[in-house]
Amino acid sequence: MKTYCHAPWVPEELEPLLDLAYNFWWSSDREANWLFDRMSNGMWGHVKRNPVRLLRLMGRQALLELRHKPEFVERARAVRNRMRADLEKDSHFRLHATTHGEAELSIETNPLAAYFSAEFGIHESLPIYSGGLGVLAGDHIRSTSDLKVPFVGVGLLYRLGYFHQHFSLDNWQLEEFLPHGFHDLPIKQLIDDDGKAITISLELPDRVVEAQLWLAQVGSSSLILLDTYMRSNWREDRDITARLYDSDRETRLQQEIVLGVGGVRALTALGVKPHRYHMNEGHSAFLVLERAADLIAESGLSLAEAQAQLRPSNVFTTHTPVAAGHEVFRRELMEPYFVPQLKRLNIGPDQFFELGHRTGTEQNGEFEMTSLAIRFSERLNGVSKLHGEVAREQWHCMWPDRKEQDVPISHITNGVHIATWIGAPMQELFDRYLGSDWLEKQEQAETWRRVADIPADELWRARGKQRAALIENAKRRAQRQLIARNVDRETLDQHVSRLDPEALTIGFARRFATYKRADLFFRHRDVLERLLNDPERPMQMLFAGKAHPADEAGKKVLQSVIELSLEPAFLGKLFVIEDYEMGFARFLVQGSDVWMNTPRPPKEASGTSGMKACPNGALTLSTKDGWWVEGANDLNGWTIGEGSDPAKSDEEMDAEDAADLSHLLEHEVVPTFYDRGPSGLPERWIERVRASIASVTPFFNTSRMVREYTERCYLD
C-alpha cells in the first residue's frame, strides 16, 4: 500500500516543509505556523492557512530564494525533526504490535478504535465539517495522536463540502457550494503496489457504486476518507459525496451507506482490524449491519447470534436530545437499497426494519439510525452529565423492563483540544508561568492553580492583544461582506469604525437552530440599546453561525439578528459575520471577553465553543444546560435562569431567561468589566478570568476525554 499526491515542487533544502504540509500536526504547533506565515509574504491568510496551496502558489522563484536563507531552512528542518520525534513516541495504550507501509504512511493495522463520523473539523483547509459535531471529531483525533492511542478515523471526502454562507439584500441566508481542488488539499490518495487507486464497491439498486480512498494524516493518527467522484460511477452517483448533510433524503441515505457499509469495507481493504468500532452519532450506524453480515458469512451464525457477538466491540455516542438530530428514513425509501443486505443477514424485510424502530413503535414505517446503533452497541454514552440523564429518559423505551436510572447509557463529557484553540499571547504566558510542559500536564489541577502566579497586568495585556486581533479580523471580514452588498462608503465607515479593541466584547457563534435562541437578548431592546451605546462603558457583540439550508425557522432567526444589526441604534456595535468557519472561530474564542450561550434547557447536549473560550480568559454567560451544568461555579462566569422546568411552557422559560440575561449583563457583567482599581485594571474581572482558566481547563479538554473513551470504551 502506498500513497499518491500531486505535491507542489520545492527545492531539496525545503523538503521538510512538504513533510509538515501533509500532516495536520503542524496546525496546532505554534512554530510550524510561524514558518508558513513567515515564508508567505502575506499569502497565509489568503489561502486559509493551507500549506499545500501556499507552496503551490508561491512559485518557483520565491522558493528558490527562500532556500538561500539558512536560518529559515534550519528552523524548518528542526520543526520537521521535532514532529518526527513526536510521532515516534510509543503508547502505553497499544494492544498489539502494529505494522506500517512506507514511512510516509502510518495507518494502524490493529488500532484500538476506528472512529466513524459524518464530518471531521480538522482545520479550515480541509472543509469537510459544518459545526460542533465535526470540530469535536477533529479535536478527538488530535488528542488520540497526542496520547498515542492507536486510532483511525473514517469519514467522507465531500467535493463541495458544506455551503459558503452569504447574506442577500433582504438579509436572508444564501448558500453557495464551491468545488475543492483535491490536489490543493493536504491529503493523499491511497494506491496499491501497482499504482492503482484502492477502491471499494457497494451494491445500490440496479448498479454498483465505487469509492476511492484518501488519507489525511493527523499526527500519528490517520483519517480515511471515501470519495465516489469516479468515472466508473454513474454521473448522479459521483455526487453522493458532493455535499455534507445533503438535504435530499435519498442522497443522505446513500451517503450513510457509503460511510457505514463502505467504511467497514475500506478498513478491510486496507487490512485494518480495529478493536472497537466507534459511531460518532447515528449517521454511520449501517456499519453494524455490514459487520454482522460478514460474521454470518464467516461463521454461519444467525443474526441474533452475530448481534450478541458484535455488541461488545461497538461504541455509540449520541450527541443531541433534539428529535431532528436523530436520522430517520422512510421504509419505502430504504427498502430497495437493502435487498442485498437482507440476503446476507438471512432475514426478511419486517425483521430488518424492526432493527431501526424504537421499542413499541414497530408499525410507524420509519427507520431510526440511533435505534439501530443502540441495539448493536454495548457501550453507549451521552456527552455531558446532564445529557446522560436526558438520554436515559429519552431512550428508556429501549429497555422497558428497567428503571430509568438503570438504562445503560453513561456519559463522557466533551472537551476541546487546547493546543489548537489557545491564542499565542496566552500560550506565551502559560509557557512562562505554568512551566514549559503545561500541555503535557493539562489534566492536572495543580498546573492551572499556577495561573494565580501570572501578574494581573500581564494577563490583562495578553487578553487585550487577543481582543485586538479579533477586532481587526472582524473589521476585515465585515468590510468584505458589506462591500459585496454594495454598501456605500459612509455606511461602511459607520459600521466598521465603531468596532473598538478596548470595549467589552461578547461572542456568540453556533448553528442557528431555534432552540439555541440567538435572539433571546433582543426581547429587551431598551436594555440592549442602552448597553451598546454607553460611551463610558462601551459593549459590542459579534455573532456568527449558519442555519441548515432546510431550516427555514433557523434562517428567520438569523435574518432577524442581521436586520437588528443594521438599525441605526446598533450600527457598528452588533455584527453578524457571514460564512463562519474554523479560521474565524479561533479569533472569536481567543478574543471574546464573554462567551454567551443561550440554549433552551435541556436541548444542548454539551456545547464545546465555550470550552475553547475559557482557556483564553473568557468568562461564560450561559443557561443552565450542557457542559455548563458541570463547569459553573460562583466565580468563573454567570448562569442565566434556573434550567429546565417541565411545568413551564417554552414561552414562559424564554421570557424569564431573557429578563435574567438582561439583568446579568446590565448589573453584573458590564460593571465588573469596567470597575477599574487604583492600578487601572479591572481587578474583580481578572480574578474571574483566573477562576475560569483554572476551573474549566483541566477537565474540559480532549486529553481527559480521549483518555476516558480509551479506558472505558476502547480497552477491555
Image (cartoon, rainbow, N blue to C red):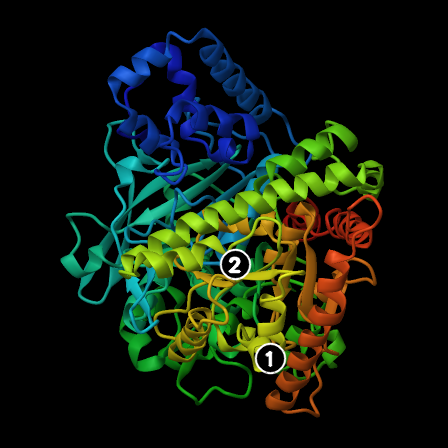
The amino acid beneath tag 1 is Asp
Residue under numbered circle 2: 132
**Residue designated by label 1:** 526
In this figure, what is the number of numbered marks?
2
Mark 1 neighbour density, 10 Å: few (under 14) some (14–19) many (20 or more): few
Measured as percent of width and height from the top left, residue 175 is found at 30, 64
On the picture, is 290 further left or further right than 598?
left
Whole-percent x, y for residue 584 in the image: 47, 49
Viewer-nearest residue: 166 or 105 = 166
Tell which tag, 1 or 2, sits nearer the viewer.
Answer: 1
Name the kind of residue labelled 2 in the image. Answer: Gly
Residue 204 rendering spot, x and y as whole percentages: 25, 63
Seen in the picture, residue 665 relative to 473 is either above or below; the reply is below
Task: Give the position of the N terminus as an image quadrant.
Answer: top left
Among the 4 quarters of the image, the one containing residue 380: bottom right
**Residue at 46% in and 74% down:** 564
**Which dot marks residue 654?**
none
Q: Is residue 554 something one can see in this rendering?
A: yes
Of the residues under marks 1 and 2, which one precedes in the sequence?
2
Observer-nearest residue: 501 or 89? Answer: 501
Q: Is residue 325 above or below residue 155?
A: below
Viewer-closest of 462 and 371:
462
CA gap, disc 1 to disc 2?
33 Å
Relative placement, left or right, of 384 versus 246 is: right
Q: Is disc 1 placed on a helix, strand or loop? A: helix
Residue 516, image x, y percentages: 55, 73
| SS label for mark 2 | helix
Q: Judge whether 467 appears above or below 440 on screen.
A: below
Q: Is residue 105 above or below residue 394?
A: above
Q: Residues within 10 Å of mark 2 (few under 14, many from 20)?
A: some
Residue 351 or 632: which is nearer the viewer? 632
Q: In the drawing, does residue 48 fall left or right of residue 139?
A: left
